[in-house]
Image: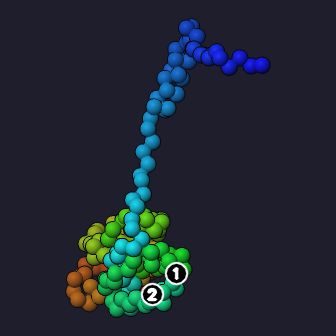
Amino acid sequence: MANTGSKVRKTAPASTTVSENQELNTNEASVSEKKSYRVKKELDPNMYVTVKNGFNGTLVYKSKKTGERFIWNAFGDEQEMELSELKSARNSSKAFFVNNWFLFDDPEVIDWLGMTQFYKHALNSKSFDKLFEQTPEEIKKSIAALSSGQKKSVAFRAKQLIADGVIDSIKVINALEESLSVELIER
């Protein structure tokens, strides 16, 4: 029979060398470091969320769950959708998220839906036009990180802003054309 009544306690020998002490201190430091985890905020699946059109034209989503149609007529238009409906859209029509056709101003919604990887470098509706105010080098870097869907939307929006005279810098236009592989102005 094993003796379960006594407790054995190990101690480090008193004659440890400097390198052993350093190793012990390093191990103690790594154990004492606390890892911080971001707790996913619990959102109510029945709450309504504003979803903006990130597509450069009319965007239509038909719910596979209810058959309801959501229509956004132009870029930036808004519709209210339930979180549970967005979760259903995530499972049945992932392209709306992969191409950033659905834009959200609330990063907690994106996190709750588990779509963070697709919105990591995405432009939201507030920052979309600010892209065109960057330097040509910054524009190239920003566009390189965008999804193909957002690149198309950037090209469409750039054409609109060029036609309206908002974008008039040749350097900015050249950076956009080079980054998007499209011709924005006729030469």
Task: State how the image is colored.
Answer: rainbow
Q: Residue at x 42, y 45 (%)?
A: 36
Q: Are marks 2 and 1 in contact (CB under 8 Å)?
A: yes
Q: Residue at x 34, y 92 (%)?
A: 73
Figure quadrant of the C terminus: bottom left
Of the numbered discs 2 and 1, the one sitting upstream in the chain is 2
Q: Which residue is mark 1?
A: 93
Q: Residue at x 52, y 81 (%)?
A: 93
**Front position in the image: 130 or 170:** 130
Q: Which mark is residue 61?
A: 2
Q: Residue furthest right?
A: 1
**Front position in the image: 181 or 82:** 82
How far, Cα to Cα, is label 2 from label 1? 9 Å
Name the amino acid, label 1.
Ser
Q: Residues within 10 Å of mark 2 (few under 14, many from 20)?
A: some
Taking 97 as reference, is 3 left or right? right
Figure quadrant of the N terminus: top right
Can you give x and y, in whole percent of width and height, for residue 172 in the image? 30, 76
Name the amino acid, label 2.
Tyr
Disc 2 is placed on an element classified as: strand
Can you give x and y, in whole percent of width and height, for residue 96 in the image? 47, 80
